Image: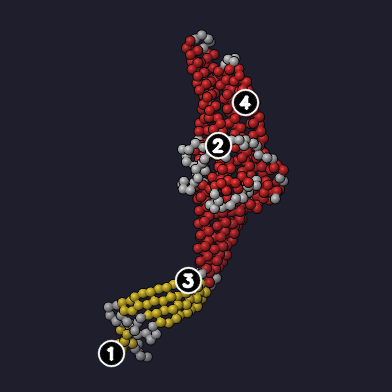
Amino acid sequence: MSQGVEPVIGELTLDEALARALKYNLERRTRLMEEALARGQLDVSQFDMLPKVMAQAGYAWRDRARFTHSSTHPSEDPNTSSSSTSADPKHSTADLGLSWSLLDFGMGYYGARQQADRLLIAGEKRRKAMHLLMQDVRTAYWRAASAQILRDDVTKTIALAEEAVNDSRNLSAERVRNPLEPLRFRRQLLENLRLLESINQELSSAQVELASLINAPLGQTLLIATQNLQNVGDEVTRVPVEKLEEAALAQNADLREQHYNARIAREETRRTLLRMFPNVSFNYGVKYDTDRYLLDNHWQEAGLQLSFNFMNLLTGPTQTKLAEAGVALADQRRMAMQLSVLTQVHLARLQLINARNQFERAEAIYETDNQIAQVMRNRQAAQAQSKLDMVSTETAAILSLLRRYQALAQVQVAENRMAATLGLEPRIGSTDALSLAELKVQVRQAPSAWQQLAR
């Protein structure tokens, strides 16, 4: 699993995380191997159109010579007074023959065309897996970044909350105040403490998920670079919806897969029709036999044969209807997928616009909560603020920062989902031929989906 994987050194940027996922992710490697297997199957299927060349050798033996009686016309009774033989009790044979069938050639031809479409389907599945992988990496990256930034604040605030809870218990034990006041105080503290612990639990798995996606050691602590906390541009809102639909209908991976399935169904119809035609086969061979009774021990043979299965007259119409039904089903699936893709385009566009707006709102809320927390810290330093207010304010600031990162991750995911719906991906070279540094540069310099549409 880790063979050939370069270790993570220094801060991990988003571009490097994407490059590592594209090069080292095990699921992506599986998709690449499936595509390579489909390419190999295409090469093998093309051999079905070649003639068959068979070489045979053998040895025959019997314990007694093969003597036979014969009769003369018009008598049918064998003449037992004389017997003869025409075969050695033991002899060796060898032959080299070539056979070619017109029906086998036609079946192999259409089978190769179907396998070529299956190779293209494997490529589309690889593209779709790459889109999903990039979405998962972006989400896990920003979750890991938020966990890295919030870890110390969450730990410090939890300690402060637990200290305040202990103080409230001491107040309740001393009974110097109304007993309801420390209980309400403790209840609010425990609620904030539960919220902080849930945040800590949610963020604790982010590093493991990111390490799994980029095939890094699961026990290694990844140092996330978090300096690029910015919203994506609004280029998508300036692209006409008609152009987005056109791009999706031409390049969407799921839709192209259905197109190839429809072509495979049509080729299957042609294969079914081909089976109902007569078959013409040709054979040629060079033979050799050590039998002493043969005048010529080596000779050549050739033959031409025409065959037809009359049962095809009965089963042919049913087979044709079944093949045509398969074509109709494939076309129906393709049309349904076209409508689904158009729907996904409109939904992905709206989700991206909404995600951008949610991030801007989350950023504004975080800035406000952060300012409030700073004021509370100053008042706490002057001992003019209670621990409950301090814990509540710090919890609100932490939660706002967490939601800011979640909103940023949703923006990244929505943008990648939009690009996947349109069938647009980074234009990079072979992940096997490129080094990690070269791949990282290509990922960073690759034009965005909207720049590709503008060209």
Distance of label 2 from label 1 (alpha carbons): 105 Å
Neighbours of disc 4 within 10 Å: few (<14), some (14-19), many (20+): some
In percent of width and height, residue 83 lies at 30, 87
Residue contact between numbered discs 3 and 4, judged by CB atoms under 8 Å: no
**Relative vertical location of residue 122 with respect to residue 367 in this rendering, above or below:** below
| Label 1 or label 3, whichever comes before in sequence order | 3
In depth, the one of 118 and 2 nearer the eye is 2
What's under tag 4, amino acid-wise?
Asn
The local secondary structure at tag 2 comes to: strand
Residue that badge 3 annotates = 52
Q: CA distance from mark 3 to mark 4?
A: 79 Å
Viewer-nearest residue: 352 or 151: 151
Q: Amino acid at mark 1?
A: Ser
Identify residue type, mark 2.
Ile
**What residue is pinned by disc 1?**
81
Q: Position of residue 92 (x, y in %)?
A: 35, 77
Q: Secondary structure at mark 1?
A: strand
- Amino acid type at image mark 3: Lys
**Tag 2 or tag 3, which sits nearer the N-term?**
3
The answer to whether 447 is drawn above or below residue 170 in the figure is: below
Marks 1 and 3, Cα distance to the nearest angstrom?
48 Å
> What residue did someone put label 4 on?
370
Mark with earlier residue (1, 4) = 1
Q: Is residue 198 left or right of residue 80?
A: right
How many residues crowd around disc 3 within 10 Å: few (fewer than 14), some, or many (20 or more)? some
Is label 4 in a helix, a strand or a loop? helix
Task: Return the residue at label 2.
Answer: 224
Camera-side mark, 3 or 2? 2
State which tag comes first along the sequence, 3 or 4. Answer: 3
The picture places residue 431, in percent across and down from the top left corner, at 55, 51
